[in-house]
Image (spheres, rainbow, N blue to C red):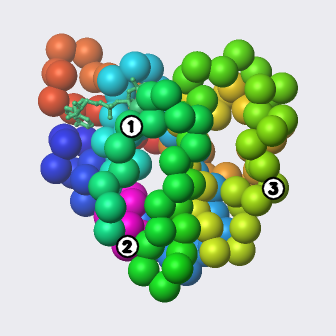
Amino acid sequence: MTLAELTVFGEQLGAAAMAALPCTITLSGDLGAGKTTLTRAIGRGYGVVEPVTSPTFALVHEYIARDVRRLFHLDLYRIKGPHELANIGWEMLSTERALLIIEWPDRAGDLVPDDALAITLAHVDDDESRRRVTW
Ligand SMILES: Nc1ncnc2c1ncn2[C@@H]1O[C@H](COP(=O)(O)OP(=O)(O)OP(=O)(O)O)[C@@H](O)[C@H]1O
Ligand SMILES: [Mg+2]
């Protein structure tokens, strides 16, 4: 997918998620693969008004969307394992009116819900403008 295609994909996915709450989407892929870029597009489609920024230092970023729906964006790159998530109120993140998007879900181990939509982004050899998107 090009950046434009990935943006449309994300916006449509975010809109679809509104009818499927609670919903968890995991985003796997190397540094720079486009996980945060896709999160922003999903957030727009979901109705988030504030831009979703890359939570490099905060583990959880919370956003309010229209109709008081919530979006929780977790970037787990910096944690070493599920034990570091003991105090973040994990159960609260998968509430009825929330979409949960997790970058680096491997770090959370068994805490990731079984019914999460698992998306993987990968660089394409010799074409920095494209990403392979699988789920
Ligand atoms: N087809 C594409 N899809 C997604 N991103 C693209 C594409 N082409 C170029 N890019 C660029 O690649 C970069 C992806 O960065 P992004 O922060 O989204 O990656 P990330 O997977 O979240 O990385 P990190 O693991 O460091 O958080 C952005 O600068 C984006 O504009
Ligand atoms: Mg990121």
Residue at (45%, 28%) from the top-left corner?
56
Please state, as top left, top right, bottom left or bottom right, where the N terminus lies in the image.
top left
Give the amino acid type for the residue marked by disc 3 in the picture.
Glu
Residue at (67%, 27%) from the top-left corner?
106
Gap between marks 2 and 1 measured at Cα: 18 Å
Residue at (37%, 73%) from the top-left corner?
47
- In the rendered image, residue 123, in percent from the top left (x then y), is placed at 32, 23
* Residue denoted by label 2: 47
- In the rendered image, residue 57, in percent from the top left (x then y), is placed at 49, 28
* Residue denoted by label 3: 91
* Residue denoted by label 1: 54
Give the amino acid type for the residue marked by disc 2 in the picture.
Gly
Q: Is residue 81 left or right of residue 120?
A: right
Residue 10 can be seen in this image:
no
Instruction: State the predominant SS element of the stretch in magenta.
Output: helix
Badge 1 crowding class, 10 Å Cα cut-off, few under 14, some 14 to 19, many 20 or more, is some
Gap between marks 1 and 3 measured at Cα: 23 Å
Disc 1 within 8 angstroms of ligand 2 (CB): yes
Q: Nearer the viewer, residue 30 or 70?
A: 70
- In the rendered image, residue 49, in percent from the top left (x then y), is placed at 32, 68
Give the amino acid type for the residue marked by disc 1 in the picture.
Ser
Dots 1 and 3: beta carbons under 8 Å?
Answer: no
The verdict on residue 13 being magenta is no
